[in-house]
Image: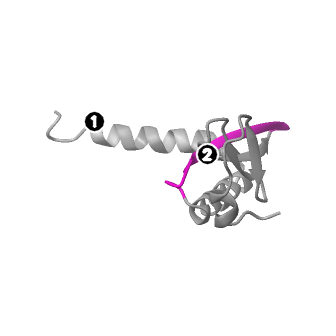
């Protein structure tokens, strides 16, 4: 069943951890305290993997679905999306370290 914004807002803390599934690997993880985080589940080299996209409401349903589409496109190219994200973050960090002001 596809998630809706109303369904997500109505997801409350129950004292137990549970997930609300969207489709194509996207799910909303609801903690026992009520915090909500987006997870993307995928298969890489025959093993199940999971990566986190961010928390709700900072990351909306529309944005989480867009990130899922990007991650699936990366997988289709034969690249692990978790490693691709780490390389992107590392490149951004290195770009800031070697500025003229820091040298």
Residues 37 and 16: in front is 16
Give the numbered dot on residue 29.
Answer: none
Tell me what residue is drawn at x 73 percent, y 56 percent. 76
Tell me where residue 77 sits by quadrant.
bottom right
Q: Nearer the viewer, mark 1 or mark 2?
A: 2
In reply to whether residue 53 is colored magenta, the answer given is yes
What's the magenta bit mostly, secondary-structure-wise? strand
Mark before the other along the chain sequence, 1 or 2: 2
Q: CA distance from mark 1 to mark 2?
A: 31 Å
Q: Circle 1: is it few (<14), some (14-19), or many (20+) Cα within 10 Å?
A: few
Q: Which residue is mark 1?
A: 97
Q: Which image quarter holds the N terminus?
A: bottom right
In reply to whether residue 38 is colored magenta, the answer given is no
Instruction: Decide if residue 80 is on the left or right side of residue 87.
Output: right
Q: Secondary structure at mark 2?
A: strand
Q: Circle 2: is it few (<14), some (14-19), or many (20+) Cα within 10 Å?
A: some
Residues 39 and 19: in front is 19
Residues 83 and 7: in front is 7
Tell me what residue is drawn at x 66 percent, y 38 percent. 31
Q: Which residue is mark 2?
A: 37
Which residues, given as a range, are shown in magenta? Answer: 45-59
Q: Position of residue 78 (x, y in %)?
A: 72, 49
Q: Position of residue 57 (x, y in %)?
A: 53, 55
């Amino acid at each position: 069943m596809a998630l809706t914004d109303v369904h997500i807002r109505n997801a409350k803390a129950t004292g137990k951890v549970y997930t609300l599934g969207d489709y194509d690997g996207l799910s909303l993880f609801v903690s026992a305290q009520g915090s909500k985080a987006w997870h993307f589940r995928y298969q890489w080299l025959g093993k199940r993997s999971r990566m986190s996209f961010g928390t709700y409401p900072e990351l909306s349903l529309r944005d989480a679905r867009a990130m899922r589409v990007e991650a699936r496109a990366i997988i289709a190219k034969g690249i692990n999306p978790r490693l691709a994200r780490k390389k992107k973050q590392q490149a951004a960090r290195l770009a800031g370290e070697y500025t003229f002001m820091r040298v």
